[in-house]
Image (cartoon, helix red, strand yellow):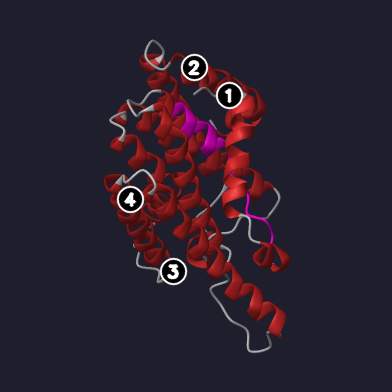
Amino acid sequence: MNRSAKDIHYVKTEIEKKIKHSYLEKYIDKPTIDEEKLFLLMEMMNHSSLPESHKQRYIVTTMLVQMALDTHDKVPSLTSPNENEDVKLQKQLHVLAGDYYSGLYYLVLAEISDFGFIRLLASTIKEINEYKMKLYYNEIDSLQEYMLIRNLIDTRLLVQVASFLNISMMGKIVEKWLLVIKLINDIEHFNARKMQVHSWVNSFFDKGELSKQLTALLQQLEDEVRKISSIYSSLSNYLETEITSIKKAYVSIMGEEG
């Protein structure tokens, strides 16, 4: 496997075939396939010792889990007494869709009898949902803990898959890169006044702090990418190009705050 646009398109098509459900699609938006995570998974599988016949199934099942988690997140946590029946139905269908995508990964993995990977995904889902509950019930004591938990929710699945594939070094790189993407999204949402955080932490956020975190993380990532360039050349080349692009795009922000 490689990470060409043709390959990514092919795997996306296979995922879309799996999740197609005419009734769900009638009432809720088609789920988004995170192409960055899909690309990273393909890179990880390319450096694993899995049989070629299994690699695509591992990618598809992992993305199904990610989509299930993302779909459940679209269900509003608060219910209004004035909600009409269409809104209630949409909420119920988002829950149903998330459960549906979760169930599909069991079916795909059962076809290759890989119960070790099933256990890994199931335990990771449980772990991520526990982190989500900590945020939901405000069981956190500081902004640092809030950021840590939020980042774990976003990166834990791919990091655990990397560990399962015995490529933990790549997993650490992937984790940092996903955090860079999240920080960039935070900065853009902050600038557009669309940043969504829990109300109690909202006052702590400012562009300067986000920019400092991004600058530090980019430096760490650059240092680690250099160390893996001879082992994971295609991933390191991709990240080096992306990091250079990010620095150019955010140089004014980081320069002002640095």
Magenta stretch: includes residue 33: yes
User: What is the crowding at mark 3: few (fewer than 14 residues within 10 Å), some, or many (at least 20)?
Assistant: few
Which residues are drawn in magenta? 29-44
Q: Which mark is residue 136?
A: 3
Please indicate, yes or no, whether residue 99 appears anywhere in the rendered image: yes
From the top left corner, tell me how far across and down residue 52 is, in percent: 41, 27
What is the x, y in percent for residue 94?
58, 68
Which of the marked residues, 2 or 1, is nearer the chain's N terminus? Answer: 2
Q: Mark 4 against mark 3, which lies toward the viewer?
A: 4
Q: CA distance from mark 4 to mark 3?
A: 27 Å
Task: First in sequence, mark 4 or 3: give its number.
Answer: 4
Q: Amino acid at mark 4?
A: Ile
- Upstream in sequence: badge 4 or badge 1: 4
- The disc labelled 1 sits on which kind of residue? Glu
SS label for mark 3 = helix
Element under label 1?
A: helix
Residue that label 1 marks: 242
Circle on res. 118:
4
Q: Does 152 sit above or below residue 134?
A: above
Majority secondary structure of magenta residues: helix
Task: Give the residue drawn at x 63%, y 30%.
Answer: 250
- Dot 1 surroundings within 10 Å: few (below 14), some, or many (20 or more)? few
Element type at mark 4: helix
* Vertical arrangement, residue 181 with respect to residue 192, above or below: above
